[in-house]
Image: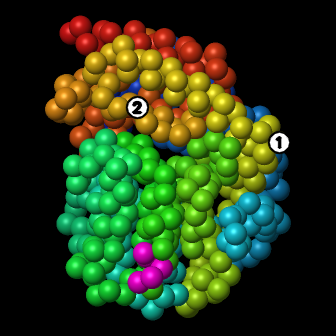
Amino acid sequence: MTRDEIVRKKQEYLFNCVATYFKDPLVIDHAKGQYVWDSDGKQYLDFLGGIVTISVGHSNAKVTEKIKAQIDKVQHTSTLFITEALVSLAEKVASLGPGKLKKCYFTNSGTEANEVAVLTARMYTGNYEVLALRHGYSGHSHLTKSLTGLHTWRKAGVISCGIVHAPGPYCYRCPYGLTYPSCNLHCAKDIEDVIKTSTSGQIAGLLAETIQGLGGFIVPPPGYFKIVANIVRNYGGLFIADEVQTAWGRTGRKWWGIEHWEVEPDIITSAKSMANGVPIGLTLTRPEIADAYKGLTISTFGGNPVTCVAAKSTIDLIEEECLMDNAETVGNHFRAGLEVLRDKHQIIGDVRGMGLMQGIELVKDRKTKEPAPDLTNQLLERARAHGLLVGKGGLYANVIRMSPPLNISKGDVDAALGTLDKSLAEVATK
């Protein structure tokens, strides 16, 4: 098909809610490593990575070769049967799980992983109410939309029965008007007041992204999760760490983002970069919590042998090539470059992130911090014109999100920084 035919058929045959970037939609034809090419043959440096999903580069042969071999062996079974691929992945994940988290439930997405986590927490604790954080994103099912704390993603008559939202740890726009560290982590301690005033006092748990992804790469301050986890457990609940975007070395040095806060969660959920773009979801917990799930369940596609092979190959590759260390080293280089851009361009109000998960928040005025969504859209367009793909997010749609593959080089980062510098200058002079 021609590019125009593809765009026309998307509009004709897909739901309008399936959003795309850019005024003139980008049609991707193929990809390799850190690059993608559109249907006209133009090359782009991919610093979005399928929304924090491409962990070891597009079409990495060390992963795709094993996928192809598994397809030729057996492509599908369902969870009613057991395969070597399924148990091998489960064993690998268990070996990397923090503390006593050893039992897995595989699904097809982060949405499903979060569903399983909440249902399991309710059955284990015997409690129903669940806490979530403002600015968080949990998925697109009925339950996970209810958990989400961003109005744009809560349409279709969501009924938040049993879900209570607490203010999130958004230091740049502190909901209490305080400043870290003099705030004494008031946002974390306020979780207790939320439980006391907005729940029955007995909760099933709290589900929180380690770093809020769609919310704009919001990074909680040091010490935040230790306080929160203790409060949640004191009221009968489980602490569920949503690692859909932050796991598998993305934050640098460690397998799980939550490890940077020195907290062992009761349940971890993950997806996205776990299989380098092949659809998968993971719910990981302690055996006694997993065993509390009552009744029979099946998953037609969860634990699919091809998907399991893709995930284990991806995790093995991250381990063998020390990509967690690369994420920290190159991520620090990236962060330093972004801070230079902040000093140079007044429309950058904040730079934040961890490892190879970095964001910049754009504002019209640094003093008022007025969000600049229009400038954000312009920056996306200018970066695309210069061959760089980045993403956006945040409650005000004014945060540029960047999550390149974990095997990206400093040279690639320098190229991206140069393009951002040029694009920021073009946006600011309009």
Q: Amino acid at mark 1?
A: Glu
Residue annotated with mark 1: 320
Q: Position of residue 32 (x, y in %)?
A: 65, 26
Is the magenta region chiefly helix, strand or loop? helix
- For the residue labelled by badge 2, is the local secondary structure a helix, a strand or a loop? strand
* 111 drawn magenta: no
- Given this view, does label 2 or label 1 mark the residue nearer the observer? 2
Q: Is residue 382 visible?
A: no
- Above or below, 138 relative to 58: below
Q: Quadrant of the rendered structure where residue 328 is?
A: top right
- Above or below, 415 relative to 10: above
Q: Position of residue 267 (x, y in %)?
A: 56, 71
Residue 306 is left or right of residue 383, and the answer is: right
Q: Amino acid at mark 2?
A: Val
Q: Nearer the viewer, residue 346 or 310?
A: 346
Residue annotated with mark 2: 351
Q: Residue at x 37, y 87 (%)?
A: 202
- For the residue labelled by badge 1, is the local secondary structure a helix, a strand or a loop? helix
Please state the extent of the stretch shown in magenta in the rendering: 231-235
